[in-house]
Amino acid sequence: MKRGILRMVALVCFVGVMDASDASAQPFEVWLVDQSNTSGVSFGGSVHIYEGVSLLGDPASAEAEVIDLADDTSALCFGATGANPVRPHMLFFDSAHEHAILSFVASGHVVVFNAGTRAPIACVRTSVGAGGARQAHAAFPAPDDSYILVANQNGKLLERIDTDADGDGVPYENALDIALDAAATLNLATCTTPSGAACQAAGLRPDNAPICPIIDSSSSLAFVTLRGGGLFVVDPTATPMAILAEYDSATVHGNGCGGIEVGGGMFINSGGGTASNLSEFDVYRFPLVGYDSENAVNSPPPVVVFSDDAAEHDRDSHGAVATKHGRYLWVGDRAANVAEVFEVRTNARVNTVDLVGDEAGDPTPDLMDISPSGEHVFLALRGPNPLSGDPHVATGTTPGLGVVKITEGGMGGFLIGVAPITNVDAGGVERADAHGIRVRVK
């Protein structure tokens, strides 16, 4: 059972009216991924798309446009790869928000959609890696739109998808533009680091399943978190991709999947959820310069912004957003149902926002994103039968999209409501399990 922690909470009143600043801002949508299979089949899943303004008054009444991934998306993937896509997991947009990139963690597919028409335009499957496994835990598009970086988790491969394969300077133009570049692959199970050490080794980096390859704004650095701990900073543009810096598991703990560049640094987390680290909440700040394969191990060193790994309470750092003007960093905790708030300038923890509300007694916040005006944070809330993550931290009671009103200039906030999703199977069991979430500016 998840247990709470001492929380510093800003007490505010909500009067149930729409926030004028977000309502008058540039129109936006919120895309939410349900990992559960389409009813009646063992593949598919769904994406729920909400008009942003519909979430700002009474989120429970918001209606979503739903993409059933067992239809056109599965047909495209089966035709291209001979396999159906299973368990949609994480979602991102290209720089212009014209294309959506959706990874399927169980089957290893990555699908690119035309975000405006919702039509899938290309489906790529990752390679077979360690032990015959392949996954696509996360597929991060480069800010300059030149590639997509894929964490092939159980295959222990870092893979790159070209987005302008025909070389005409127009990325994401059609299916022929989007192709796996096999020559770029970095095998994290068998490679050797610049120092001559094994990339994966007991006591150093014991389990090199890549979790999230977080790309900097220049598209020239990728910070690759590892399930068993440790981290690699990689040049994702090299062929094959090259390790520029190596960090061991004592320096960077495992299961990180929250990262964001803000205030001249790259903030990376580590989380709980596996036998090696059931309770983990760490936040590190890495510099954006100084990476060279001739550097010493664990160099340049990250700053440990915050660490709470005590066994007496469950913690699981997961998901992060920066508030308006990059003043504050929010890092979610699935286990404790909070967001820790840090001042970016000083690295100081300044608040703990309680994400429990009347509509969600155990919300289990997973990934998150922020509205264009910076007035609201949107949360993916997990379901009672989670399909990813250790159940002791990933089990929630209200699968859906949580809406948080930001207060105190970004330092505080509170849950105003939940737009629920549901997928009840033939046995009457709720299978809906939200995970990926992104805001799309229209």
Image (cartoon, rainbow, N blue to C red):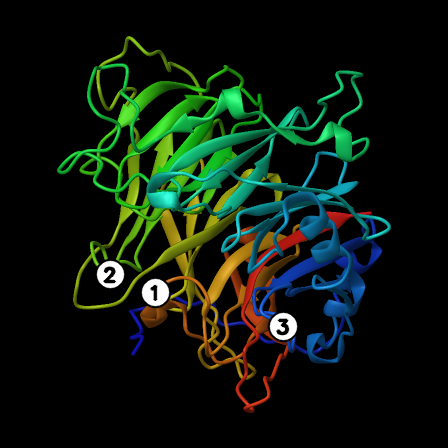
Q: Alpha-carbon neighbours of circle 3 within 10 Å: few (<14), some, or many (≥20)?
A: few
Residue occupying the far bottom of the picture: 428
The label shown at residue 278 is 2
Q: Amino acid at mark 1?
A: Asp
Asked whether, in this view, residue 404 is left or right of residue 64, the answer is left
> Disc 3 or 2, which lies upstream in sequence?
3
In the foreground, 186 or 409: 186
The label shown at residue 390 is 1
> Disc 1 or 3, which lies upstream in sequence?
3
Q: Quadrant of residue 317?
A: bottom left
Q: Tell whether label 2 touches label 1 (CB within 8 Å).
A: yes
Place of residue 233 in the rendered image (x, y in percent of width and height, measured from the top left): 38, 25
Asked whether, in this view, residue 303 is left or right of residue 378, the answer is left
Quarter of the picture holding the N terminus:
bottom left
The label shown at residue 41 is 3
- Residue 101 seen by the camera: yes
Asked whether, in this view, residue 90 is left or right of residue 278, the answer is right
Place of residue 323 in the rendered image (x, y in percent of width and height, measured from the top left): 57, 47
Place of residue 16 in the rendered image (x, y in percent of width and height, measured from the top left): 70, 78
Q: CA distance from mark 3 to mark 2?
A: 33 Å
Q: CA distance from mark 1 to mark 3?
A: 24 Å
Marks 1 and 3: which is nearer the front? 3
Residue occupying the far right of the picture: 117
In percent of the image, x 56 and y 41: which residue is there?
Answer: 139
Q: CA distance from mark 1 to mark 2?
A: 8 Å
Image: 250 above or below 13: above
In the foreground, 48 or 403: 48
Q: Alpha-carbon neighbours of circle 1 within 10 Å: few (<14), some, or many (≥20)?
A: some
Image: 141 above or below 104: above
In the foreground, 153 or 48: 153
